[in-house]
């Protein structure tokens, strides 16, 4: 990622020394981890070496634009997962319209669907040439669409200039991952009350990574909650549907669907509405050396329960990369 937006107002304030130190943004919490964000520009990464060097959280570029997939997306994902790091994905936005932003959000959500990640999916916003109204609307369209499709609260990455001058309160309801380099704390004095992630330099050096890499600090707010980590289905209501019919179809209760979607009248739903369906299981990506017995022990379940839930005919035969449902 690279900062591209320059706000003259902020520059003038900084040059004249009129920005009070009290306005510097504070972290969501003091519980933080050392992190990096990587893409094709870092090439192959030795994630165990990076972990030995203190890295605990990694953000991986999954996609960009309408259909671009980072060449190292899968390799970085497998490497970070096998190294036991906290990991999340980000999408580099190129759309300048709300419809385009929603389309790119759908592409990104589909790409990471079914993968194992415990950090919030992120929008990488580095667009220039947009008015504050346009920038805020485009960012909000992407974030809302991504939230609907994934069932989790996403995060926005942007530099401090964009955070101050291009975003509004509607966007600021989403966690902020701010880029502000070589300063004591992020210089954000509008919209957000605190930062969830802070990219503090683009010239970091980390074992296992050749050349410079972006370095970050991430608070615990970047992690998905236990409820968010449960897989969810987004269902579009069809003619003739009732909440009871939908609940039976997915093996959940009407009450669970009502609570997940804030439905005021369970007897009044319309074709075309989209509901998040909370599924009663978690997801696990099989790693090298895993056995079904070991996974069952880890999650307090049984081999037979896992085999039945996942349609496994031979419990002795599972493969790294397989996505397993785990009863909760």
Image: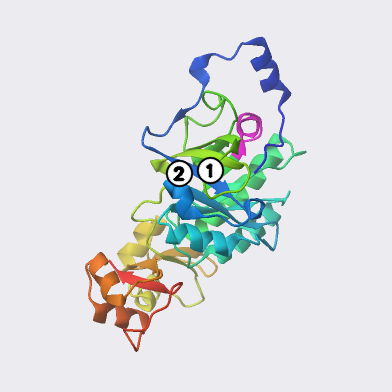
Total residue callouts: 2
Provide residue 210's location: percent of width, then percent of height: 61, 48
> Dot 2: within a 10 Å radius of its alpha carbon, few (fewer than 14), some, or many (20 or more) residues?
some
In the rendered view, tell whether residue 157 sits above or below residue 248: above
Observer-nearest of 318 and 66:
318
Q: Position of residue 260 (x, y in %)?
A: 38, 58
Question: In x, y percent, where is residue 265?
Answer: 38, 60
Please give the range of residues in magenta: 158-169
Of the numbered discs in the image, which one, if any, rests on residue 27?
none
Q: Is residue 274 above or below residue 90?
A: below
Q: Residue furthest right?
A: 129
The mark nearer the N terminus, 1 or 2, is 2
Tell me if residue 109 can be seen: no
Callout 1–callout 2 Cβ contact below 8 Å: yes
Q: Give the residue displayed 70% in from the left and 60% down from the top.
A: 66
13 part of magenta stretch:
no
Display coloring: rainbow
Q: Nearer the viewer, residue 79 or 7?
A: 79
Residue 62 place in picture, x, y as percent: 60, 58
Q: CA distance from mark 1 to mark 2?
A: 7 Å
Pointer 1 residue:
206
Q: Nearer the viewer, residue 260 or 288?
A: 288
Which residue position holds label 2? 53
Q: Nearer the viewer, residue 209 or 232?
A: 209
Q: Disc 1 on helix, strand or loop?
A: loop
Dot 1 alpha-carbon crowd within 10 angstroms: few under 14, some 14 to 19, many 20 or more: many
Task: Identify the residue at image location x=31%, y=63%.
Answer: 255
* 22 sits to left or right of 307: right
């Amino acid at each position: 990622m690279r900062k591209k937006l320059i706000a003259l107002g902020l520059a003038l304030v900084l040059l004249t020394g009129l920005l009070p130190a009290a306005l510097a943004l504070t972290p969501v919490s003091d519980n933080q981890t050392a992190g990096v964000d990587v893409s094709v520009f870092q090439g192959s990464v030795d994630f165990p070496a990076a972990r030995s060097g203190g890295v605990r959280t990694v953000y991986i570029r999954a996609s960009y634009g309408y259909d671009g997939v980072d060449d190292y997306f899968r390799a970085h994902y497998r490497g970070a997962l096998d190294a036991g790091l906290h990991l999340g994905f980000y999408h580099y936005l190129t759309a300048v319209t709300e419809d385009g932003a929603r389309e790119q959000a759908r592409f990104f959500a589909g790409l990471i669907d079914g993968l194992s990640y415990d950090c919030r999916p992120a929008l990488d916003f580095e667009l220039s040439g947009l008015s504050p109204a346009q920038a805020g609307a485009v960012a909000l369209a992407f974030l809302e669409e991504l939230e609907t499709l994934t069932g989790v609260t996403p995060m926005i990455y942007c530099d401090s200039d964009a955070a101050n001058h291009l975003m509004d309160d509607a966007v600021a309801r989403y966690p902020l991952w701010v880029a502000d380099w070589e300063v004591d704390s992020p210089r954000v004095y509008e919209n957000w009350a605190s930062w969830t992630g802070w990219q503090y330099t683009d010239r970091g050096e980390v074992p296992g990574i050749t050349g410079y890499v972006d370095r970050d600090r991430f608070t615990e707010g970047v992690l998905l909650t236990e409820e968010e980590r449960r897989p969810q289905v987004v269902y579009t209501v069809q003619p003739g549907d009732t909440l009871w019919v939908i609940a039976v179809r997915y093996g959940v209760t009407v009450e669970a669907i009502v609570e997940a979607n804030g439905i005021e009248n369970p007897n009044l739903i319309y074709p075309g509405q989209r509901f998040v369906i909370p599924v009663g299981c978690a997801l696990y990506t099989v790693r090298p050396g895993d056995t079904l017995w070991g996974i069952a022990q880890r999650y307090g379940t049984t081999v037979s329960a896992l085999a039945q839930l996942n349609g496994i005919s031979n419990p002795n035969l599972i493969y790294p990369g397989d996505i397993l449902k785990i009863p909760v």
